[in-house]
Image: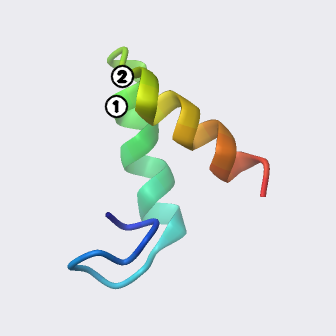
Amino acid sequence: MYDRGLGVEKDEAEAVKWYRKAAEQGHVVAANRLKEMEMR
């Protein structure tokens, strides 16, 4: 959502925060997306 600006203003820092929270809870897709964002 935040990484693409869907329904909210685009905010990569906020996206990383939410992807990290989800990844810490075992969400594999969020973990992969977080890695992609960190590689940019």
Q: How far apart are the alpha carbons under marks 1 and 2?
A: 5 Å
In which quadrant of the rendered image does the N terminus lie? Answer: bottom left
**Residue 9 location (% of width, % of height):** 34, 85
**Residue 16 location (% of width, % of height):** 50, 51
In which quadrant of the rendered image does the C terminus lie? Answer: bottom right
Residue at the far right in the pictured view: 39
- Mark with earlier residue (1, 2): 1
Picture residue at 54% right of the left edge, 42% below the top: 33
Disc ID at residue 37: none
Q: Circle 1: is it few (<14), some (14-19), or many (20+) Cα within 10 Å?
A: some
**Residue 2 location (% of width, % of height):** 37, 67
Disc ID at residue 22: 1
Q: Secondary structure at mark 1?
A: helix
1 vs 14, left or right, is left
Disc ID at residue 27: 2
**Residue 32 location (% of width, % of height):** 56, 32
Label 1–label 2 contact, CB within 8 A: yes
Amino acid at circle 2 = His
Q: Residue 23: which quarter of the image? A: top left
Picture residue at 42% right of the left edge, 42% below the top: 19
Q: Circle 2: is it few (<14), some (14-19), or many (20+) Cα within 10 Å?
A: few
